[in-house]
DNA sequence: ATTATATAATTACAGGTGTAATCTATTCTT
DNA sequence: AAGAATAGATTACACCTGTAATTATATAAT
């Protein structure tokens, strides 16, 4: 529910596949993770365990195996993290972050058009 | 020079005041930090020490005391961190991050106008 | 029923972090 | 000169992280 939960970067990667597809067993999660890079089964199990303890995910027993589900919403978690970064390095403002990308040529035509789209939408919704 | 350096959140806070004003002695840094919240002198010294070891800051001896200087550019560090977050949670795209803010009403009229400004500038500079 | 196998729980372990206290060498006071 | 104050160096210490190995337990196979 409320995002008091702190999760680490690797824990996030595991949670990510659970967000994409849940509920899921440890083995399903491990298989999915291994599509991208090598993950040791034991490592993933440890991370799942830690996230259970942190309350970031929950599970149901399906006989001997556990079927996990996220207890944390992706959107609220990423928003919290984004706000934290903005707070820490850009006085909480979004523009300086975007300016940093612009300055070092990290923005594509596509990015710009997506941003314009968002702004248009915002302006329609507000005022 | 090249930003290989990993610094922690608290280290960043200390480095922040050094970026604002350098070179500076430990005491000057401590004084500045304490304008905002309580910082124990020993803690700050430890952090300075660690950053020296990491190569994030350097110093010159002024008799018995050290005068510190950042060896890391703020802009490149914040850009690196921003990119890292975007990579990890938004497939490297900026728009979804901004969309998250919009969705939860975290954008002000001011933010929007700053973003528009940036976009205009970008369009002028590019194509 | 015994053994092999699969799952989860517990333990490991080095390196980072936040937060200091203690030790050591030097400089300022008196 | 002797003692006090100070700056930096070293040590402390619990908790988090990344990365597993080991152990215990339950189930499947023979």
Image: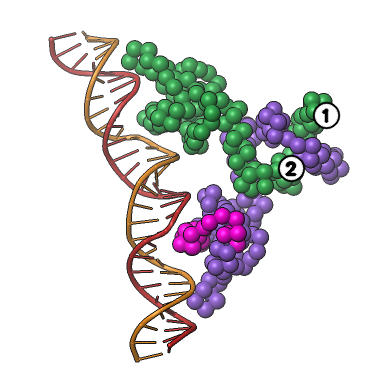
Chain colours: A purple, B green, C orange, D red
The magenta segment is A32-52
Q: Is residue B24 left or right of residue A37?
A: left
Chain containing mark 2 = B
Residue B79 vs C13, above or below: the answer is above
Residue B58 vs A47, above or below: the answer is above
Q: Position of residue C23 (x, y in %)?
A: 22, 30
Q: Position of residue B105 (x, y in %)?
A: 74, 44
Figure quadrant of the C terminus of chain A: top right
CA gap, disc 2 and disc 1? 20 Å
- Between disc 2 and disc 1, whose residue precedes? 2
Report crowding for label 2: few under 14, some 14 to 19, many 20 or more residues within 10 A (C-alpha): many
Disc 2 vs disc 1: which is toward the camera?
1
Taking the spot 60% from the left edge, 55% from the top edge, the residue there is: A36
What residue does disc 2 label?
A: B95
Disc sitting over residue A14 in the figure: none
Q: Position of residue B14 (x, y in %)?
A: 48, 28
What residue does disc 1 label?
A: B127
Figure quadrant of the N terminus of chain A: bottom right
Residue A45 included in the magenta stretch of the image: yes
Q: Could you tell me if residue A113 is visible in this image?
A: yes
């Amino acid at each position: 529910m409320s995002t008091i939960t702190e999760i680490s970067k690797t824990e996030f990667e595991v949670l990510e596949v659970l967000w994409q597809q849940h509920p899921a067993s440890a083995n399903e999660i491990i298989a999915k993770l291994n599509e991208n890079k090598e993950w040791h089964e034991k490592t993933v199990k440890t991370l799942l365990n830690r996230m259970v303890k942190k309350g970031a995910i929950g599970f149901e027993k399906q006989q001997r195996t556990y079927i996990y589900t996220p207890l944390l919403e992706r959107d609220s978690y990423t928003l919290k993290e984004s706000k934290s970064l903005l707070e820490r390095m850009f006085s909480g403002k979004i523009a300086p972050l975007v300016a940093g990308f612009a300055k070092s040529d990290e923005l594509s035509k596509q990015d710009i058009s997506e941003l314009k789209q968002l702004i248009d939408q915002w302006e329609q919704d507000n005022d």
